[in-house]
Image: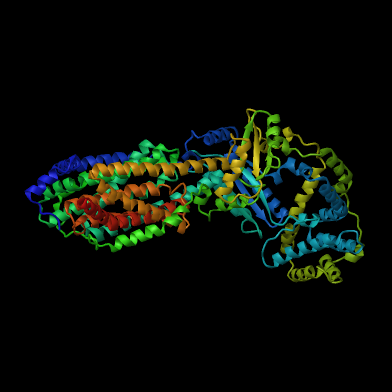
Amino acid sequence: MVEPLNRHNRERLNRDGLAGRLSAAVMACAAAFPRATLCGLAGLVAIAAYAATGLGVDTDSSRMISPELQSQRAAQVLNEKFPSLKSAIIVTVTAEDADTADLVVADLSAQLRATTATIASVFAASDDPYLRAHGFLYRDEDDLDAMFERLSRSANLLAHLRSDQSIDGFARALIEALDLADRAEIGEDALVRLLAEASSVLEAHALKRARNFSWSTVLEDEPSGIVTRLIAVKPVLDHQRLSPARPALATIEAANAAIYEDRLDGVQIRITGEPALRAEELRSVTGTIWISLLLSLVLVGALLRWGLRHWGPVLLSLGVLVISLVLTSGAAALTVGALNLISIAFIVLMVGLGIDFAVHVLAHIAELRFHATPPKEALRLTGLRSGRALMTCAITTAAAFLAFTVTDFHGMAQLGVIGAMGVLIAWSVALVFVPACLALRPGLVGARAPMTVPLRTGAAGPAVIVLIIGAAAIWPALQAQFDTDPMGLRDPGAQSVQAFRLLAEKPETSPYRASILVDTAADADRIAAQFNDRPGIGEALNLGDLIPQDQDMKLELLDFAAGSIDHAIFGQPTALVGDAAISGDRVGALIARLGQREDMAQRLKRALEAYQAERTAESDAMVAERIFGSFRLLMGRLEAMLNADRMTASALPPEMQERFLAEDGTYRIEVVPEGSITNSDESARFAARVAEIAPEAAGGPVQLAAAGAAVAEAMLLATALAAVATLLACLAATRSVIDAISVLVPLVIAGVIITGFSVVADLPFNYANVIVLPLMIGIGVDSGIHIVQRERQAPGAVFSTSTPGAVMVSAATTVAAFGTLSLSDHRGTASMGILLAVGVSVTVIAVLALTPQIRRWLLRREHAA
């Protein structure tokens, strides 16, 4: 039972320290001048609400690490000299063959170039005029010689197709190809591919699906199969928006939807690149944050009604919460200006933390009123009894938040500053808002028996269970990992993330590349050569590597083949099959000709018969476009090839040059991994191998490795600082080593359990959830201090007071608020919500089960000694 409120007990409470007397004085002052207090709060809320309208969101995750780190400085220099590396939007076009991909790229690029309001420039290697003419120079001599030989054999067939790009013209060309194959003048493999492509186009048309004829599949010895083409888009940035590239992204998305996404079989168009990733991440973080906020408020209200048993205290608690949220938002706008992708979660975190102080104040007042204490005396005694615990809790939780401010992890430091301000604001608001309201409406808090927790001091069962779980969690806790890859935080269903993963699968398109900046071309050649044959390194490229080798020999091969190519492009086709054999209905003639063979021709014969049965002028136009769409691209490429000459660096497209040569003459070396990089460990190993030769290197893998080390160090340092600050605050509050141990031991056990849970649940620590352990220390010590302080006031009867119930209600509201973050599409924010919810639950259970037992056991030993 609670000690009776006699004169001796009240005098002891009056001597309970400065914090208690100060809290009692503040509450008494607010109660004495309630209207002035509430008007003052209203004025502050109005000012804060106005300031909060200027609160923005910074989506650049690279700025979440200290700019003083060497890797960050190197990245800053790289971005200044080569801005297109970071600002470009990358459109990936994946198709079942090279021709379809090239068609999509050509049409999409043309549409984007026409939208100058949002698109600054567009570059696609497969659609660039200079590279179309000179691309053959990048092939090796044997491959090039074979290609020209195939073109020579096919020149007359191509001339026939060029001269009559209709279904009938195509049928006539196929009849000629069949005849040439019978005479062994063209290869059987080429004929099979030709017939198969024609069959696929007609079969797709019958199913009302769109499929292009792939001429590269027919003319190449080794068909390309599934290919991915890239389009680099430089956006016009609108810096008035949270997502500056959003207008350009909307333009690209509209072009995708209008052209190909639904019209062509096997075509996938995705958008990635830094601007797209940042826009998607902003959407995933902010898209559900307001849903989480609304849901957390509803859940918190319901839990308050359950725990406080009356709507009056519920409304007062929610009032404290809303005022604290607005004041904290205004303070954040004035101090940090723009939230980052981590600190934006403070909105929901404050719902969980900002209400705790009001809950404890109201629970104390309700308990005292239940024991017939007059209203003014109830306010005074509440300040005296709980003032020190409330102040200590505010300080320890704020210290846990602030622990990150001394680290290089600026992203979490920002959340730490905002969270610390929010906790101190919520504590202050609870001490003035609740008394002011009760002075005007005393009936808002009725006289009710305190909510109790179904535990009793001396019951060892719950403590044993917690200790067993803690011991079992030690082994998995030792396996805890930190995931340094920010891609692991993003929504895996986002198209920008899917496209990024697709590019990372192949070294030639991998975004995980390191960059080295040098002053001269000679330095670039020298350093790039040092990476030859290094394990884990695919290649090191510089501007000189963009110029093909052995150009003179390849141009000679082109001269030898020029006559045949010229015939295919400009010449009159030679009739190798008599017109009498194909007069009249040419499609019917082709069907008859196919009937004479027993190989792949039968598939095409069936497709043609089905087509012929429902043939119309409209269907002829549609099928002809599918057959000859990429054929026109082929003819254009061959024509451009005839005008090719030696390639030089100065003649390369500007978009290629600016990737390797800055305006101030700085040269860039691009180091490519040997294989795919799919996780942070592989990225770190690649960065370490690059650093062996170039410690000053920059780029994604280098930044990720350095940032991962900085964040891991920040987590350890912040946890240690939070533990030390908590220990000192606990000793200052309790003035007892025994009480401090009683509070801290459950926190250590809870920390082991939550760390083990992160391993078992496959929720590794990451950039977003590293705050969990430091915050658990701050929140956990609050509960422990409340229990210890009340145990000292009511020895052996703490579970019959309002304090354990208030701790449980406070924890339940915190868990509910934190848990709503798990709804986020952003996996980092979701993991933060899950780990915080589980962590708070485990910590409070450990405190309730262990703190009274440990204190009782230690006091016994002290007395026995």
The image shows residue 405 at horizontal and vertical percentages of 39, 38
The image shows residue 546 at horizontal and vertical percentages of 72, 38
Residue drawn at x 30%, y 62% as measured from the top left: 462
Horizontal placement of 782 versus 229: left or right?
Answer: left
The image shows residue 442 at horizontal and vertical percentages of 14, 52
> Could you say which is closer to the camera, residue 686 or residue 796?
796
Q: How many marks?
A: 0
Horizontal placement of 505 versus 337: left or right?
Answer: right
Residue drawn at x 81%, y 60% as measured from the top left: 170
* Residue 159 versus residue 21 in the image, above or below: below
The image shows residue 727 at horizontal and vertical percentages of 31, 44
Quarter assignment of residue 43? top left
* Residue 821 versus residue 409 in the image, above or below: below
> Could you say which is closer to the camera, residue 585 or residue 659?
659
Quarter assignment of residue 472? bottom left
Give the quarter of the figure containing the N terminus: bottom left
Horizontal placement of 475 versus 515: left or right?
Answer: left
> Could you say which is closer to the camera, residue 385 or residue 172?
385
Residue drawn at x 33%, y 62% as measured from the top left: 465
* Residue 725 versus residue 780 in the image, above or below: above
**Residue 192 showing in the rendered view:** yes
Horizontal placement of 709 versus 741: left or right?
Answer: right
Residue lying at the far front of the rendered structure: 865
> Could you say which is closer to the camera, residue 282 or residue 672?
672
**Residue 428 showing in the rendered view:** no
